[in-house]
Amino acid sequence: KAGVTQTPRYLIKTRGQQVTLSCSPISGHRSVSWYQQTPGQGLQFLFEYFSETQRNKGNFPGRFSGRQFSNSRSEMNVSTLELGDSALYLCASSPHGQFSGNTIYFGEGSWLTVV
Amino acid sequence: GQQLNQSPQSMFIQEGEDVSMNCTSSSIFNTWLWYKQDPGEGPVLLIALYKAGELTSNGRLTAQFGITRKDSFLNISASIPSDVGIYFCAGQSFNEDQLIWGAGTKLIIKP
């Protein structure tokens, strides 16, 4: 069965612009989590969506937002981009979400470069 | 908040050597997960552990859920060049609703 699909794979944006990243989870998975990973850093949790509701949120400013659709696909948006937002953005899906101890499966990520 | 201490931060090893890394938490966990991330890719699940004392293998990889429930170990036997990458541990405790992540162990094989 298909894995987690993230689009676009690579993109370059200018400071002040906004960006939308998309994630299609594994079929049947209802939870989607987003992470930011900067070079040489670990995984920083952004938020988790389950059945179209945000269930958890990390310590990121309000410029970072997300949503989930009825088919479980998710988007994350970053407004007013800053240079420090340059990172690999990872999406992960799981059947029932992180709270139940489910394992999560990652996509290949979207590389965002802000210039 | 909870923290995971993953060590070592990086390792330089010779091909064929065995590798060990570990994660310790400040509280009791009920789930431990180990992932590997290749450069430019998303992390891939290696081993999942759900029971204290559990020892699980995946090829040359073996991971253990510590009996104190506050630590986990990953061993790689007879390392090969494709083992290079960053290994992450992640855990979850009973009263938390999200995974806690280690900072990663970067494995580098000496030429």
Image (cartoon, rainbow, N blue to C red):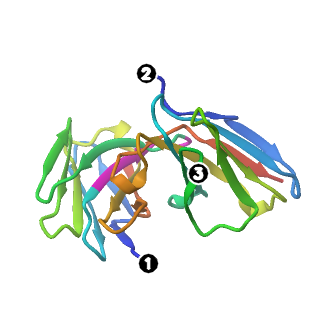
How many numbered discs, if any?
3
**Of marks 1 and 3, the one in the foreground:** 3
Q: Amino acid at mark 3?
A: Thr
Numbered circle sitting on residue A1: 2
The image quadrant where one finds the N terminus of chain B is bottom left
Where on the picture, by quarter, is residue A91? top right
- Residue beneath disc 3: A53
Q: Position of residue B14 (x, y in %)?
A: 29, 48
Q: Disc 1 to disc 3, how far (Cα)?
A: 24 Å
Number of other residues with Cα within 10 Å of mark 1, as a class: few under 14, some 14 to 19, many 20 or more: few
Taking A25 as reference, is B62 above or below it? below
Q: Residue at x 20, y 39 (%)?
A: B60
Q: Secondary structure at mark 3?
A: strand
Q: Is residue A93 left or right of residue B102?
A: right
Numbered circle sitting on residue B1: 1
Q: Secondary structure at mark 1?
A: loop
Q: Amino acid at mark 2?
A: Lys
Start-end of magenta stretch: B32-40
Q: Is B57 in the magenta?
A: no
Q: Amino acid at mark 1?
A: Gly
User: Are marks 2 and 1 in one subunit?
Assistant: no
- Between residues A107 and A48, which one lies in front from this camera angle? A48
